[in-house]
Image: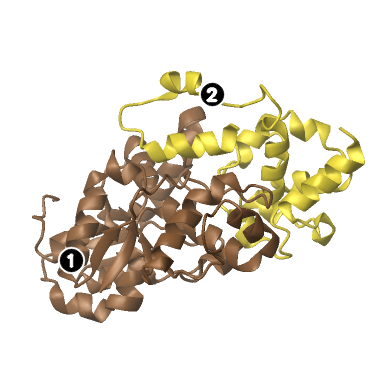
């Protein structure tokens, strides 16, 4: 199947590996990603104020293009996913906001019709974790892996509709699907500090170290994430177990990439 | 700005009804930036409700919110305090010359491995 794809700013620069293995693993699982033409940066965080219109236009344009091609829109960066899904929800539920946005759209109005998937959701709901399981080798068997959801994948739960925001299973189910063993820990859906790393590195350090220590205390040998900023904060603040994108592990399990981790 | 108008504007922008708050403090208890805040999420709710907005407008607390949506998710009354924090922040930074961060500040804060995501997020929250 063909799916519209929104890579986002960081996947074209500091996280090119996240982009590369998203493409390659999707292809191996029968999904062809078609990058949105002339996509613009989502802005990184969703502006919650109802009177913020301009900051949401890039998301709406991407959604509109996917809808016009009759394709779902897929993202893999947690931040893009959060911004685009929340924007789509606002277009569906806030008529006054949608009317303001549509004044910037040249042709037909958009009302939130496109389906938005995070790659993890696509793997679960479209490809199916069972189908993933059939295609992977046992190279990751016995590996204890902690899923780090962070803040942006799941919240706000009623808008993101990805999983239970306080007791999620999607990443643990993914870990099982690729043949490894999930490690559940309390701080898996707590914030790493995000962009505060620029202004208050000490706050990012406290939050990030808390996550890593908690995962290790539960026996984790590795942490997986979908977010470039989570990965940066965890590594920058001294994680002494590997912190990798979930797509890299999927690539290893599918035999697309060699396992270079211990 | 007229105090009553400012309060009404904040409520309209955020969509928050502070009267729903039962002051349980769960928003502040779950806030990952609590220790670095002068005013905490529950105080944003009560102070806006009371019209005591000026101290919030000039507080660094506006720039400590991580936009992690924890208080929004966990409020048992659905008050969604972060939306109010953001509305106050926007009133502050929308004033000409009041950006909390400008492009000139970035080189000093920049670090080799820092993902672009951090910079664009900070700009969206700190600048207009």
Q: Which residue is mark 2?
A: B102
Q: Colour of chain A?
A: brown
Q: Is residue B126 left or right of residue A23?
A: right
| Whole-percent x, y for residue A207 in the image | 47, 43
The answer for how far apart the CA atoms under marks 2 and 1 are is: 41 Å
Subunit bearing disc 1: A
Q: Quadrant of residue A170?
A: bottom left
- Mark 1 is surrounded, within 10 Å at the Cα level, by few (under 14), some (14 to 19) or many (20 or more) other residues, namely some
Q: Is residue A161 left or right of residue A13?
A: right
Q: Which residue is mark 1?
A: A27
- Mark 2 is surrounded, within 10 Å at the Cα level, by few (under 14), some (14 to 19) or many (20 or more) other residues, namely some
Q: Residue at x 81, y 55 (%)?
A: B18
- Location of the N terminus of chain A by quadrant is bottom left
| Whole-percent x, y for residue A254 in the image | 13, 66
Residue found farthest to the front: A107
In this view, the residue in front, A3 or A117, is: A3
Residue under disc 2 on the same chain as residue under disc 1: no
Q: Is residue A125 above or below residue A83?
A: below
Q: Residue at x 33, y 52 (%)?
A: A37
Q: Is residue B31 left or right of residue A26?
A: right
In this view, the residue in front, B90 or A115, is: A115
Disc number for residue A177: none
Q: Residue at x 32, y 40 (%)?
A: A235
| Whole-percent x, y for residue A32 in the image | 22, 66
Instruction: Count up the numbered dots.
Output: 2
Q: Colour of chain B?
A: yellow
């Amino acid at each position: 199947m063909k799916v519209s794809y929104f890579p986002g700013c960081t996947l074209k620069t500091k996280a090119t590996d996240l982009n590369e293995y998203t493409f390659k693993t999707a292809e191996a699982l029968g999904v062809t990603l078609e990058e949105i033409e002339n996509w613009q940066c989502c802005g990184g965080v969703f502006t919650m104020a109802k009177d913020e219109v301009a900051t949401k236009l890039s998301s709406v344009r991407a959604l509109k293009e996917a809808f016009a091609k009759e394709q779902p829109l897929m993202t893999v960066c947690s931040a893009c996913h959060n911004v685009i899904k929340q924007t789509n929800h606002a277009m569906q539920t806030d008529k006054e906001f949608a009317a303001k946005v549509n004044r910037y759209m040249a042709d037909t109005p958009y009302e939130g019709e496109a389906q938005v998937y995070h790659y993890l959701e696509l793997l679960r709901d479209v490809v199916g974790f069972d189908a993933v399981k059939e295609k992977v080798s046992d190279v990751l068997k016995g590996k204890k892996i902690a899923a780090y959801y962070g803040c942006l994948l799941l919240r706000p739960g009623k808008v993101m509709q990805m999983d239970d925001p306080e007791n999620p299973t999607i990443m643990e189910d993914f870990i099982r699907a690729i043949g490894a063993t999930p490690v559940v820990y309390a701080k898996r859906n707590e914030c790493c500090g995000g962009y505060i790393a620029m202004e208050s590195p000490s706050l990012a350090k406290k939050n990030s170290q808390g996550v890593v220590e908690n995962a290790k205390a539960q026996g984790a040998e590795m942490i997986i994430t979908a977010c470039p900023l989570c990965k940066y904060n965890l590594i920058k603040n001294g994680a002494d177990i590997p912190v990798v994108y979930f797509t890299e592990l999927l690539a290893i399990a599918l035999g697309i990439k060699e396992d270079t981790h211990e | 700005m007229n105090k009553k108008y400012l309060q009404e504007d904040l409520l309209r922008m955020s969509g928050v009804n502070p009267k729903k708050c039962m002051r349980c403090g769960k928003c502040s208890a779950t806030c990952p930036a609590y220790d670095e805040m002068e005013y905490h999420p529950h105080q944003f709710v009560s102070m806006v409700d009371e019209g005591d907005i000026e101290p919030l407008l000039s507080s660094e607390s506006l720039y400590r919110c991580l936009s992690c949506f924890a208080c929004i998710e966990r409020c048992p009354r659905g008050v969604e305090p972060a939306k109010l924090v953001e509305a106050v922040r926007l009133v502050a930074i929308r004033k000409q010359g009041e950006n909390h961060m400008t492009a000139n500040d970035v080189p000093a804060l920049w670090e080799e491995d820092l993902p672009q995501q951090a910079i664009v997020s900070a700009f969206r929250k700190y600048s207009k």
